[in-house]
Amino acid sequence: MTLRFTHRQPRASLAGVCLAFSADGVRWSQPFPLIPSATYGPRTGDHPAAGLFRDGDAVVLYIQHNVPGINAADSRSKIGRSTLRRYAVPFADFAAISSAALAGNVTAST
């Protein structure tokens, strides 16, 4: 199983869209940072959207960047226009990341 989520860890200066993996749906791996994101208070400006699926030799996911309403104090010109972007990760890389995560050996540089 794969979980996509936004994650913010201020002490580690980490914020972004992350993946976590589970073999049983109960115990999950440590977050694997996939896409870094700007922060607005306790929230990140980018969110995963539209699932995660295999497309040929790639695993595809969509990220919505500059999600509207994340920080009402910022004007749209300051945070930028909201966009939906497609990311493709080679399947072999995704398989290696998920295997390492499930073994407890995943880091941001994996």
Image (cartoon, grey):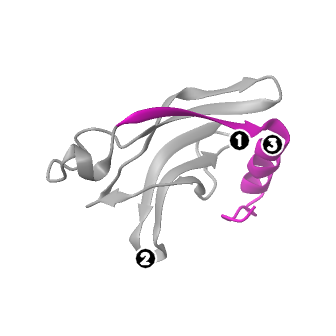
Q: Name the residue carrying label 1.
A: 23
What amino acid is at disc 1?
Ala
- Per the rendering, the mark at residue 11 is 2
SS label for mark 3? helix
Left or right? Give the position of 10 relative to 24. Answer: left
Residue 95: numbered disc: 3
Q: Residue at x 54, y 41 (%)?
A: 4
In the image, residue 80 above or below residue 54: below
Identify residue type, mark 2. Answer: Arg
Q: CA distance from mark 2 to mark 1?
A: 29 Å
Q: Earlier in the sequence, mark 2 or mark 3?
A: 2
Disc 3 versus disc 1: distance between alpha carbons?
A: 13 Å
- Crowding at mark 1 (Cα within 10 Å: few <14, some 14-19, many 20+): few
Q: Position of residue 76 (x, y in %)?
A: 23, 44
Q: Secondary structure at mark 2?
A: helix
Q: Is residue 92 above or below residue 110?
A: above
* Residue 75 position within the rendered picture, expressed as x and y whole percent measured from the top left: 18, 48
Determine if the magenta segment contains residue 72: no
**Lower sequence index among marks 3 and 1:** 1
Q: Residue at x 78, y 56 (%)?
A: 100
Which residue range is magenta in the image? 82-110
Location of residue 62 (image quadrant): top right
Quick one: 47 or 101, which is closer to the camera?
A: 47
Residue 38: quadrant of the picture: bottom left
Marks 2 and 1, the one that precedes in the sequence: 2
How dense is the environment of label 3, judged by Cα within 10 Å: few (below 14), some, or many (20 and up)?
few
Q: Amino acid at mark 3?
A: Ala
Q: Is residue 65 left or right of residue 25?
A: left
